[in-house]
Image: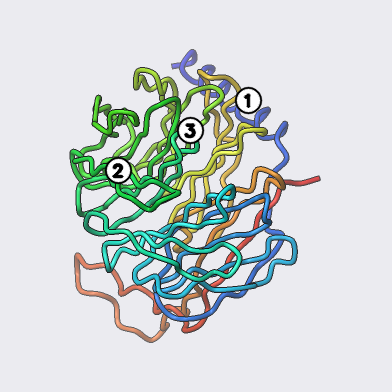
Amino acid sequence: MRRRWQLVFGILALATVSVAGQDKYSKVAEIPIGGAGGFDYLTVDSDAKRLYLAHSTEVVVVDTEKNTVVGRIADTPGVHGVAVVSSMGRLFTTNGRENKVGIVDAKTLETTSKVETGQNPDAINYDAARKEIWSWNHTGHSATAIDAATGKVNATVPLAGVAESGGIDGGRAFVNIEDKDAIDVIDTAKHEVVAHWTVAPAESPTGMAVDTARHRIFVGGGPSLVMMDSANGKVVAHVPICMGTDGTAYDPSTKLVFVSCSDGKMTIARADTPETLTVVQTLETARGARTVAVDPATHHVYVAAVSYAPPDPNAPPPPAGQRPPRPAPIPDSLKVLVFGPGK
């Protein structure tokens, strides 16, 4: 028993050193967005100093220097995500309710054309090496590869199940298969699935980020964040995370991984080496802030959330075995919260 407690105290001491050695994140700004309807992924364009927030039937465009809304992209029904292709002056949106990807002029914010995809396109990635857009079609159980220059569909790839977030590394695309506790691996030249890797101890994987320099995949799902070798799918490290995640982001210069959750917390872990992963902070964010984006230039981290009405103190208790009703969201309260490291 004594040896066990010595081990526990040793682990806690190491964790304390890790936290002390890392500049902690804290809230630095709050950007009012407003409007009605749900929200999904956030995307940062560091070069343009822009943040894109998928919001129901529009994409909200934020100036990340001034922390103000500077535009909106309309005609994006059920939008989930945005991919930025700066070299072509284009943005690509996944319009879930119409099963299409929108092609948008990045300057005018006007949609110039649309491309048919599988059912409910969700997350989206750009493969710069092949100049292809990958739409991960959630309930369509498929991926659509689109030529970013012409808008032509190059391939539709069947997947093993419900598609969530994805990533690209070294001639392969990776996508979380939420209902299979796994990721599908796609050969981007052949446009076909070549492997199927389990993500245990993560479950129902949602968020994904990729370290292309060290060839590591970070997957958040259920109780865990796992770090995987992108060459063979081996889980080389894992840590516990907050509850209800739907987003994972990675800052390559600080080696920090950000996992945002609907319980109002964000787990921040550091990948000091390709084999180690350590939780350095649990950050308080806001209830429902389940997606996340990081700006690698400023190291600012962004989440979106709405405010909720306080519970009614006079409400009767729920029946035995049932949870109390969820608090009601306050209309027009959507906001983006900005967090930055200490100086």
Quick check: marks 2 and 1 in contact, CB under 8 Å?
Answer: no
Instruction: Decide: is 290 above or below 231.
Output: below
Question: Foreground: 81 or 67?
Answer: 81
Which mark is in front, 2 or 1? 2
Q: On the rendered image, what quadrant is the N terminus found in?
A: top left
What is the CA distance from the residue labelled 3 to the residue labelled 1? Answer: 44 Å
Specify the farthest residue to the front: 150
Comparing labels 3 and 1, the label whose residue is closer to the camera: 3
Q: Secondary structure at mark 3?
A: loop
| Quadrant hosting residue 9 | top right
Type of amino acid under label 2 = Asn
Q: Residue at x 39, y 79 (%)?
A: 328
In the image, is 240 to the left or to the right of 211? left
Q: Residues within 10 Å of mark 1 (few under 14, many from 20)?
A: few
Amino acid type for the residue under numbered disc 3: Ala
Q: Position of residue 264 (x, y in %)?
A: 49, 58
Residue 122 appears in which quarter of the rendering?
bottom left
Compared with residue 211, is residue 328 higher up or lower down, i.e. above or below? below
Which residue lies most toward the top here?
A: 3
Q: Measuring from the top left, give residue 33's x and y in whole percent.
A: 57, 75
Label located before the other in sequence (2 or 3): 3
Q: Which residue is mark 3?
A: 129
- Per the image, the residue denoted by label 2 is 154
Q: Which residue position is annotated with label 1? A: 13
In the image, residue 221 lies at what x, y percent?
A: 35, 42
Task: Tally the marks.
Answer: 3
* Gap between marks 2 and 3 measured at Cα: 15 Å
The answer to whether marks 2 and 3 mark residues whose Cβ atoms lie closer than 8 Å is: no
Q: In x, y percent, where is residue 36? A: 44, 80
Residue at screen point 37% across, 45% down: 134
Q: Amino acid at mark 1?
A: Ala
| Residue ID at (29%, 47%) | 144
